Amino acid sequence: RYFPVIEKILLENGVPDDFKYLAVAESGLRHVTSSANAKGFWQFRKLAAKEMNLEVNDEVDERYHIERSTRAACHYLLQLKRRFGTWVDAAAAYNVGPTNYRNDLRDQKENTYYDMNLPEETMRYIFRLVAIKEIMSQPDRFGFYIDQMERYPPLDNYREVLVDQSIENWGDFAHENGVTYRQLKIYNPWLRDNHLTVIKNKYQIKIPNDVGK
């Protein structure tokens, strides 16, 4: 369901396609919250999200916005690649945190992931990404037989409505646009409240087409 969107943004930003599996490792492509209060597919904590120019407040949380959070993840990964030299090191630093990774490199007098002694989760992280890729790209080899009818349909049949004024109630907005509140939230999970206060930002809201057909 989500890979076509993620793949396109990775390609546009010069990040290897395999990094879509990092989102799987981080969140299972679900809108989850970690024990460290990281959220969304790419598991940004609040401060890091704001540093990547994602809006995070009680009404809007763009960590749940697939396009904007994926662009933020690309920007962050490119920063890590420039800082640590390789995509493998960038992925490891994404997992353990760049400050911790820098300190471990310094303290252990090493310059590559494969020569380091790191927390168990990070030691397994790169190999976990490889395993996820292998299983998801050829599931039948590993005993997963998924009929096409059992796959989640893509959320790609929608139009966008520009919102530049406050919305008192998203239920009213949804019904005015021919959809239900639930359908609106499925396509726009980053809308976190039942209303929206617009001060200066503008928002593109996805409205699904052919509802019920």
Image: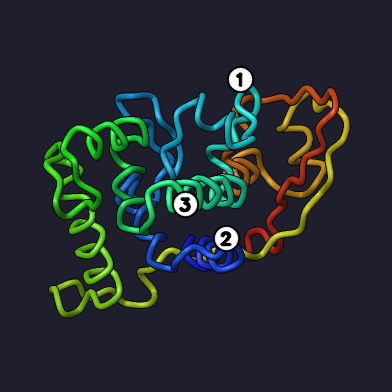
Return the mark for residue 58: 1
Which marked residue is nearer to the observer: mark 1 or mark 2?
A: 1
Q: Residue furthest front?
A: 109
Which marked residue is nearer to the observer: mark 3 or mark 2?
A: 3
Distance of mark 3 from mark 2, alpha carbons?
34 Å
Give the residue at mark 3: 82
Give left or right: position of 50 versus 93.
right
Q: Position of residue 100 (x, y in %)?
A: 29, 31
Query: Is the image coloured rainbow, by chain, by secondary structure, or in one colour?
Result: rainbow
Q: Amino acid at mark 3?
A: Arg
Q: How many marks?
A: 3
Q: Residues within 10 Å of mark 3 (few under 14, many from 20)?
A: few
State if disc 2 and disc 1 touch (CB < 8 Å): no
Which is more toward the observer, 19 or 23? Answer: 19
**At x 34% / y 35%, what residue is drawn?**
97
Q: Earlier in the sequence, mark 1 or mark 3?
A: 1
Q: Earlier in the sequence, mark 3 or mark 2?
A: 3
Q: Residues within 10 Å of mark 1 (few under 14, many from 20)?
A: few
Give left or right: position of 156 versus 86.
right
Q: Residues within 10 Å of mark 2 (few under 14, many from 20)?
A: few
